[in-house]
Image (cartoon, rainbow, N blue to C red):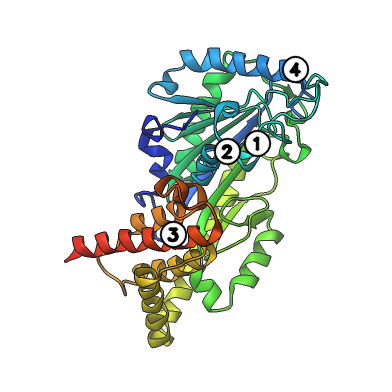
Amino acid sequence: MTVDLSLIPDGGLGWLDASGPQANVVLSTRVRLARNLTGLPFNVRSGADDRRRVLEAVDAVWQRSPLARGGVRFLVDELEPRDRLLLHERHLISKELANAPGERGVGGAGGGGGTGEKAASHAAVYLAGALGLMVNEEDHLRLQVFRSGFALSQAYADLERLDRDLGASLPVAFHPEFGYLTACPTNAGTGLRASVLIHLPGLVLTKEIAKVLQGLTQVGLTFRGLYGEGSEVVGNFFQLSNQTTLGKSEEELLDHLGKIVRQVVRYEEQAREVLRRDATTIIEDKVWRAYALLRYARSLTFEETMNLLSGVRLGVGLKLIGDLSVYTLNKLLIYTQPAHLAVLDPRAARDAEQRVARAAYVRGVLEEEAARGR
């Protein structure tokens, strides 16, 4: 089965449109809830039949939900590896679901049947507008919402409606002392993980970033790369999220994260002002060199592309570059990744071919943008 991206509202990339609050610094907001059903083993110990029952139960409820109107469902087992990676690159499924069926997190462990064949994962992803629901990942259910810019309260309001809608018909595992029960104890309590994807080149260039990141860990937050846990920070893009899920309410967790993110945004804006005031020539040179390389390079690695896009994005934020939209730069973060390049050019299988295809795609997009600005 091949993913038909036209079935997904906005291609699942509405959060990239730079329409949200403070979108010049904060690319996106994601809020996620982990839930499990009572009466069935959690996925760390479940078998194929258990996972099938979870999927059937969710499927029945989802089809009746008004929130799912116009949505789409993909069964992970039926997707080609490239298409699973494509959904992962768009942040629509996790790294675990992007793995091949039968691997950990997609159903290889626990009660597969002992025949030597890979057990069916019965993993699925449901998408409807900004709403997403992963089934049979680490937990039975992973509900998530993406919003453009810095929009924690709006994202949680959307997600809370979906949580209530599903919870009204599905028996969810809950303990009066420990809250929502999850496969990993670090997610118990609210089951909530909220994060923002934030661009911090000013703090990096002024060498203040280490102090800021150290401060985050001291107040119960964590930072990761573009794709969360296990991903490296590239291009000065950081994912900031809460570490605690137990002992506080959802509103308290979101309020705490929101206060800290607002402070980090202020620090970044101050750092950019320092660069504009004290290092104008250096920053202009850095920004325009990055733009020139993206416009004319014939081979680009993914890391090079992220770093160059970071420089150009800083230039747009400082109004050094006009007629170039943040939305275009945001899209390039996604469309220059391997699975997207393979869709654009099926020959881009090996790394060297990917580099050439990546550079050609970036050149084309920036040329179109420059032509519109003439």
Local packing at callout 4 (Cα closer than 10 Å; few below 14, some 14-19, many 20+) is some
Q: Residue at x 31, y 71 (%)?
A: 319
The residue positioned 32% from the left and 58% from the top of the image is: 365
Q: Nearer the viewer, residue 329 or 280?
A: 329
Query: Would you name the residue on which mark 4 appears?
Result: 40
Whether residue 22 is visible here, answered yes or no, is no
**How many callouts does the rendering have?**
4
Residue 69: x %, y % from top left:
39, 21
**Are the residues flagged by discs 4 and 2 in contact, CB closer than 8 Å?**
no
In this view, 169 is above or below 234 = above
Give the residue type at disc 4: Leu
What residue would you read off at disc 2?
81
* Spatial CA span between label 4 and label 1: 24 Å
- Judging by the rendered image, the residue that carries numbered circle 3 is 358
| Alpha carbon separation for disc pair 1 and 2 | 7 Å
Q: Which residue is mark 1?
A: 100
Say what amino acid the circle numbered 2 marks.
Pro
**Is label 1 in contact with label 2 (beta carbons under 8 Å)?**
yes
User: Disc 1 marks which amino acid?
Assistant: Ala
Q: Earlier in the sequence, mark 3 or mark 2?
A: 2
Q: Is residue 217 above or below residue 133?
A: below
In the image, is 349 to the left or to the right of 228? left
SS at circle 2: helix
Counting residues from the N terminus, which is met first, the one under dot 1 or under dot 2? Answer: 2
The structure residue drawn at horizontal position 78% and vertical position 37%, both measured from the top left corner, is 185
